């Protein structure tokens, strides 16, 4: 069943009626930390800042919220935040990605304790591989952030920050969660400080029988799988001037899809030295190495033939140096530089490939006036495979009154062409024999097919093959108004992101078997714009309400021009006549909803040592793909998914001080929906339905 618009607001009203990295640098910002420990973040500026004082649009998800909701993976909690949507990807190995302000997951940088995570075999980064059992908080910076973080931060940054030990006694927890579809999740964590040495250890195991959204098709939509996560961290405080941090993480996942195989491995190590030569200066020296591996083989069970081999081995090595100089309590200079060396060995490439780049960045955070905070920064990237990039950004926050502030930012971002867009050499034997070539190998690939007499017609000029791809780029604008008084806080944020040189696929040639050869080209010019509203109301220490809304418009500029020039047509399904499209008929980019809402209510009952929470998310209709052949998504396409709401509920109670029992339901209304891309005689669902869970947590 779908919660309609009226039902959604009635539910909202009834429940409303019934019922807040750089550790060493914190030593020099005690005044900030005293204000609100739960609201301290580091991602937006790479320095310690209080959330409410930032001139940037930032979302903070606290540990308390993670624990009370009962979720187990990063993608689940992100999907409940304003302006953030988890979207599926139907491409090879795509998985699910995260969309921020209408910007696709390809352009969102994901960090783990401040260092980048790799493993985008098809653009998306699968966020379900990140367990949240040892997460302290999650920080999301919206809009271009390349001025600090470089490529892939064109649309925003997600930083997952893990916990640090705080006690001289051994502490930790053991928990087990069981849920629908035989979903079993067990984890254990340990941490302790002993004199100047601290450590933490975390282990997590997740398994499930999977589920099926295509009831009339063979196999499951999500196959049975199990995975393990291990994370160990060491801390050494030599003195007030020097401390050392080391971390290691390993993730392993295997799917049960015999006779085919699918394994995933993710390992990284990090070493960071913090040096404080004076009370005003902090230096950080960091070494980071990560390796992401997948082994995927699709086998025809009937004759045991190998159809697709998609092995993927990506390595990244990055040394970096950062410098913070607190000129005075209101003026901070941040600078740094580093080197990236990245390699990828993939079975869909003709050979092992590598990138290397050098970068420097600088940022000045200052208050020229008592009520005005400015942050100006820029980063320069020199890359081996594309032109150098300069990414500036400036942000400002002005306090109009004690309770009212206005903030604004403008910045540029970029994304380098990835390995796939440059070096992919793939022919799909299982899908009719189409081919896809990356830009650097397309000339060689076309020549090979011509030599084998597989090309019927060439669709591009030979001299155009192999021309360099430019880096994708964007300019993002944000204008916000913040109001906070007593128990109420609110924020209104207007945004626009303009993109150019987006890399798209194009047809290079037609093959003699009737299939096409695809390549990549800089072509698309798109924009996303809209507004976000966040409201928080805390009538008492025990009750907390919050709500969020996003209005989004996302369009391809070239498509809009084609419509204005009268060049786009569609068939009216009612009259069966061909009509010329108007601007109002153009719905926008695929997989974007015009309206998204969320509502959360958290209630604590101290005398019962219990808590409860209700979380509702609503997503209005969105289109999956162009179905009438005019190259854009219009109101006459039949690929739209109707708007729907998901309701999640959780209850928790503490027994005997150290035992917490929790139970709840995700998708309480049992929404399943229908996928419009299903064949006439088949049925494909949107959601597997209600998912019940219970969890036992023991702290010590």
Image: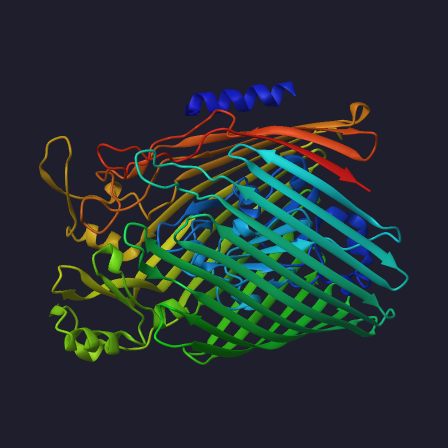
Q: Is residue 464 left or right of residue 577?
A: right
Q: Looking at the image, which residue sits at the far front?
A: 303
In the image, 467 versus 293, the foreground residue is 293
- Identify which residue is drawn at 81% across, 23% down: 607
In the image, 567 versus 655, the foreground residue is 655
Measuring from the top left, give residue 6's x and y in whole percent.
Answer: 44, 21
Q: Is residue 233 left or right of residue 579?
A: right
Q: Is residue 281 left or right of residue 691?
A: right
In the image, 574 versus 167, the foreground residue is 167
Residue 441, quarter of picture: bottom left
Residue 472, quarter of picture: bottom left
Vertical side of 184 occupied by 373: above or below: below
- Identify which residue is drawn at 50% across, 43% down: 532
- Identify which residue is drawn at 82% across, 57% down: 30
Vertical side of 643 occupied by 296: above or below: below
Measuring from the top left, give residue 161's x and y in whole percent.
Answer: 66, 55
């Amino acid at each position: 069943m779908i919660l309609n618009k009226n039902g959604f607001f009635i539910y909202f009203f009834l429940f409303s009626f019934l019922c807040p990295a750089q550790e060493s640098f914190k030593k020099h910002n005690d005044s900030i930390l005293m204000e609100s420990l739960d609201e301290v973040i580091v991602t937006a500026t790479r320095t310690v800042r209080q959330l409410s004082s930032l001139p940037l649009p930032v979302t903070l998800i606290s540990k308390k919220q993670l624990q009370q909701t009962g979720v187990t993976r990063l993608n689940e909690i992100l999907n409940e935040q304003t302006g953030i949507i988890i979207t599926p990807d139907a491409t090879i190995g795509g998985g699910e990605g995260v969309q921020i302000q209408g910007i696709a997951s390809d352009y969102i940088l994901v960090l783990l304790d401040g260092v980048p995570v790799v493993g985008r075999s098809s653009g998306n980064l699968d966020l379900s591989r990140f367990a949240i059992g040892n997460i302290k908080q999650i920080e999301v910076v919206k809009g271009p952030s390349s001025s600090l973080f470089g490529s892939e931060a064109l649309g925003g940054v997600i930083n997952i920050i893990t916990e640090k030990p705080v006690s001289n006694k051994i502490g930790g927890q053991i928990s087990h969660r069981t849920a629908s579809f035989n979903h079993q999740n067990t984890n254990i964590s340990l941490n302790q400080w002993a004199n100047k040495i601290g450590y933490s250890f975390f282990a997590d195991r997740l398994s499930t029988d999977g589920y099926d959204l295509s009831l009339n098709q063979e196999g499951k939509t999500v196959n049975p799988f199990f995975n393990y996560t291990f994370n160990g961290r060491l801390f050494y405080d030599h003195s007030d001037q020097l401390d050392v941090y080391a971390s290691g993480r390993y993730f392993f996942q295997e799917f049960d899809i015999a006779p085919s195989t699918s394994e995933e491995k993710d390992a990284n190590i990090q070493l960071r030295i913090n040096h404080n030569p004076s009370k005003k200066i902090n230096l950080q020296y960091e070494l980071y190495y990560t390796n992401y591996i997948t082994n995927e083989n699709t086998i025809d069970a009937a004759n045991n033939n190998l159809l697709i081999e998609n092995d993927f081995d990506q390595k990244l090595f990055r040394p970096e140096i950062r410098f913070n100089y607190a000129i005075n309590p209101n003026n901070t200079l941040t600078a740094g530089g580093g080197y990236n060396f990245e390699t990828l060995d993939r079975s869909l490439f003709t050979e092992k490939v590598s990138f290397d780049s050098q970068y420097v960045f600088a940022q000045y955070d200052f208050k020229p006036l008592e009520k005005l905070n400015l942050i100006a920064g820029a980063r320069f990237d020199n890359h081996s495979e594309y032109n150098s990039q300069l990414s500036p950004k400036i942000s400002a926050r002005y306090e109009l009154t004690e309770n009212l502030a206005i903030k604004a930012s403008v910045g540029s971002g970029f994304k380098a062409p990835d390995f796939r867009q440059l070096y992919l050499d793939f022919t799909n034997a299982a899908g009719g024999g189409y081919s896809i070539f990356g830009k650097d190998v397309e000339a060689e690939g076309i020549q090979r097919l011509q030599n084998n007499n597989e090309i019927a017609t060439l669709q591009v000029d030979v001299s155009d093959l192999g021309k360099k791809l430019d880096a994708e780029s964007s300019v993002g604008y944000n204008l916000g108004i913040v109001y906070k008084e007593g128990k109420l806080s609110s924020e209104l944020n207007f945004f626009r992101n303009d993109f150019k040189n987006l890399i798209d696929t194009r047809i290079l040639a037609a093959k003699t078997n009737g299939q096409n050869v695809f390549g990549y080209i800089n072509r698309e010019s798109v924009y996303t714009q809209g507004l976000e509203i966040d409201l928080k109301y805390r009538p008492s220490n025990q009750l907390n309400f919050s709500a969020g809304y996003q209005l989004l418009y996302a369009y391809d500029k070239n498509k809009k021009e084609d419509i204005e020039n009268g060049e786009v047509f569609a068939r009216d399904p009612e009259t069966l006549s061909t009509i010329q499209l108007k601007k109002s008929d153009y719905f926008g980019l695929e997989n974007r909803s015009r309206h998204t809402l969320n509502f959360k209510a958290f209630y604590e009952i101290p005398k019962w040592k219990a808590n409860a929470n209700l979380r509702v998310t609503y997503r209005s209709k969105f289109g999956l793909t162009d179905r009438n052949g005019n190259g854009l998504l219009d109101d006459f396409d039949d690929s739209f998914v109707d708007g729907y709401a998901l309701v999640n509920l959780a209850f928790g109670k503490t027994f005997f001080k150290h035992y917490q029992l929790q139970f709840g339901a995700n998708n309480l209304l049992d929404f399943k929906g229908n996928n419009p891309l299903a064949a006439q005689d088949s049925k494909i669902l949107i959601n597997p339905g209600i998912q019940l869970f219970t969890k036992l947590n023991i702290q010590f």
